[in-house]
Amino acid sequence: MQLDEKDLQILRTVQHDGRLTIKEIARKVHLSTTPVFERLHRLEDEGYIKRYSAVLDAEKLNMGFVVFCNVKLRQMNRDIAMDFIRRISDLPEVTECYNISGNFDYLLKIHVPDMKAYQHFLINDLGAIESVGSIESTFVMQEIKQEHGLNF
């Protein structure tokens, strides 16, 4: 399906603030509420909008120690990859996981309270996955930019 400019305006609007009412969205995109309601539901049904969420302050929640962890598996095949993905998906400290190209197979973004918690995670959780061959950790010293949306 092709998106028109009104669809894109609706997507930009709800991406910026997912708590807006249909009436508020309609006012911002210069449409009445009925077409906005219909378009919004169509965009949700067709998967353009995956979900609505709030952006939380990791520091205030004592989860501000951020680590990017590169993981190389000992060997790669479908079953090993699927097992790794399943196990990583069950770890709440892993907030993002990407299958990447290059010297490593996966890039993980991990949120924990501190270095001690990361060490525990590394040894007891990530280290317990038999297929993991090597790990390289990069610790975030300062977050410069964090965008949760797309610019289109």
Image (cartoon, grey):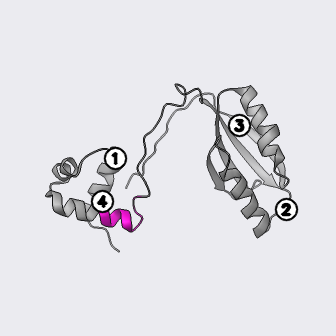
* Residue 56 versus residue 15 in the image, above or below: above
- Residue type marked 3: Thr
User: Which quadrant holds the N terminus?
Assistant: bottom left
Label 2 vs label 3, nearer the camera: 2
Q: Eyeballing the image, is 69 above or below 106?
A: above
> Which of the 4 image quarters holds residue 67?
top right
Circle 2: residue type: Gln
Q: Which residue is mark 2?
A: 75
Is residue 151 a member of the stretch shown in magenta? no
Between the residue at mark 4 and the residue at mark 3, the CA separation in whole angstroms equals 36 Å
Q: Which residue is mark 1?
A: 18
> Residues in magenta?
41-49
Quadrant housing the C terminus = bottom left
Q: Is residue 64 left or right of residue 105?
A: left
Residue 76, compared with residue 95, is above or below; it is below
Residue 91 seen in render: yes
Task: Name the element at disc 4.
Answer: helix
Sequence order check, earlier mark of 1 and 2 = 1
Farthest-out residue, bottom = 1
Tell me if 114 is positioned left or right of 131 in this view.
left
